[in-house]
Each structure stands twice: as structure tokens, then as C-alpha cells.
Image: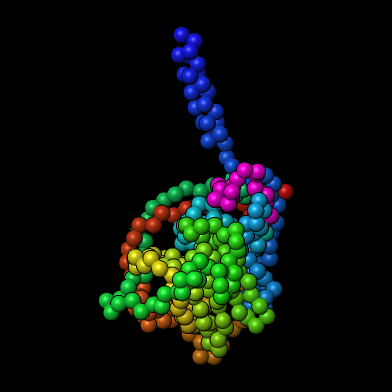
Amino acid sequence: MLSTRIPWVSATLLFVTFGAFAQAPLSFEVASVKKAEPLSVNLVMSGKMNLGMVIDNAQVNIKSMSIAELMRVAYKVKPYQVSGPEWLTAERYTITAKMPAGTNRDQVSEMMQALLAERFKLVFHRETKEQSVYALTVMKSGLKLQESPSDDAVPGTSGGPATPQAAAPTDGSAQVRVNVTSDAGGTVQQASPNGNVKFAPRENGMRLELTKMNSTGMVDTLGRFVERPVIDATDLKSRYDLTIDVGWGDMMTMARAVGMTIPMQAPPGAMDPGSSAVFTAIQQYGLKLEARKAPIEMLIVDHVEKTPTDN
């Protein structure tokens, strides 16, 4: 009798123990959260403001990210899936955190969920709504993209900006897990698991040089310059190199989306705000943005506090 009961008792204890661990939220061992100054076009373009997230072994360093961006990391969603107060994208924070022993970078999203709940008192609910979107599709004339060289298939391996070695694998949150740097000449470089983007200023706009870019990276990049969510309907599997010229209106759309302050006036001959050159610029590559309706799952913020609790 005893020999038959011991396995049952052991299995029961194992189940209870596992259940207890499964319910315990995974959080950072220690985290320092501080407010950062608002994003500024002048500071970014002059090389005085870098932003993004880098994971170095057990250390997580976040520079000047908004709660909306932190939610994208935590819940692996796109920018357009987060809805909340206007300041959600404007207020920026710098976070230095240490991961518990035995954890890895794939668990950072769960730790970020705990940090948002504990330090910002974040409460939200999910809601699926049918929305107007743009679908990135291949034109009937066929794809005209140039595939990236095979030895450059992984972002940052050669040429262009180096991707932080601690960047997360490509997933729904990868567009947030980036390293953004700039120089005094106004050139901004962004490296992420979905590809690299070099933003070079021009007289009436900006030139985007995309390298080692997959379709997820294209959708994320194009989505910054239009007023609707952009979804991927290309079924592209490779990585590509392409160049896109955008106008002043496109830049204003991108800046407003991230809560950036815009102190300067539009130059003479610049595109009217609200218009976009992106639609025609991508057609040279056999791509187009097609207006559609699609169900989008939203994270609706019910409560969140601007000032985090003390460190």
C-alpha cells in the first residue's frame, strides 16, 4: 500500500509546487526607473539623444522609451495596438534593471509586464475592433526588390550599424527591441532583428536606406509614415535592401506618433502635413499599400500613472 501511495503523493506535491511557481509573476531582481526628457528632433538629429533597449547578459538598459513602447515589449504587440491617454507616447523613461539568476532575454517581456503593473500601476483590457488599415501587398507587375547578400542575412553582421548582440529574436515585439544612434550630421541609424534603417536628412525630407530588411521590418517602417495601421500581406520570406525618399509631411507624421516635439518650421516647397510620399515611393519595388478593413486586437489602457513609484 505504501509503495503505491508514494508516487501519487509525490505527483500531487509536484503538481502543487509547479502550480505555485506558475502563478508567481516573474519580475526583475532590481530596477531603477527615472523620467527622461521628451524626445526632440534637434537632440536626436544632433547625436545628443540615443534611445532603445539593449540586453547585456543579466543587465537590461532602456533609454528614453515611452510606456506605449514598453507595453509593446511586454505584450509583443504593434504600435497601433496600444490605446491610451495622449501622454502615453510623449512621456519618456530610462530604466536600468537586473534579471534574476537563471533567466534569459526571452523572459524580459514577462518581467516588463510586472514592472509596468508594479511601478506604473498599469491596468488595461483587450478588445478586438474592425479598423481601416493598409495592407502591404505585391503588385500584379511583380516584385522588384533586391535581396540582401546571403552573408548579411542577420542584421548587423557586416555593413551598416551593428545590432546589439542581446537583441531579442524576431517576434511581435522585435520592432521595439532596437538600438538607435545618431550623429552630428543628422544621420540616424536604427538596428533591430528585423533589419537596419539609416535615416539621412535631405533638403525637403529624408532618405531611408533599408538593409537586411524582412517584411515585418518593412511594415513597421512604413507604418510610421501613414495614418492607419499597416499589416503584412506579402508572404515575403527573404531579406531585402531598398531606399525610400519621404517628405516633410511623412516626417511630421512619424514625429507626432512618438510624441516628439517639433520646434522648427517646414522648409519652402515641403510636402503638406497629412500627405505621404510613401505610397508612390514603394511602387518602384513592386509594392503597394492597399486600403482594407481588418480586425485588430487592441490593448486599451484603463489606468496608468505618469510618475513611477520610488526605486
Instruction: Give the residue at x 65% y 48%.
Output: 99
One can see residue 226 in this view: no
The answer to which quarter of the image holds residue 39 is bottom right
Image coords of residue 47 (percent x, y): 67, 75
Instruction: Give the residue at x 68% y 80%.
Output: 184
- Say which of 217 and 95 sits in front: 217
One can see residue 144 in this view: yes
- Say which of 268 and 106 sits in front: 106
Instruction: Give the residue at x 66% y 78%.
Output: 183
Image coords of residue 284 (percent x, y): 37, 82
Residue 285, placed above or below residue 309: below
- Say which of 159 and 104 sits in front: 159
Report whether 306 appears left or right of 295.
Answer: right
Residue found at the very far bottom of the displayed protein: 268
Q: Magenta stretch?
A: 95-112
Residue 277, placed above or below residue 117: below
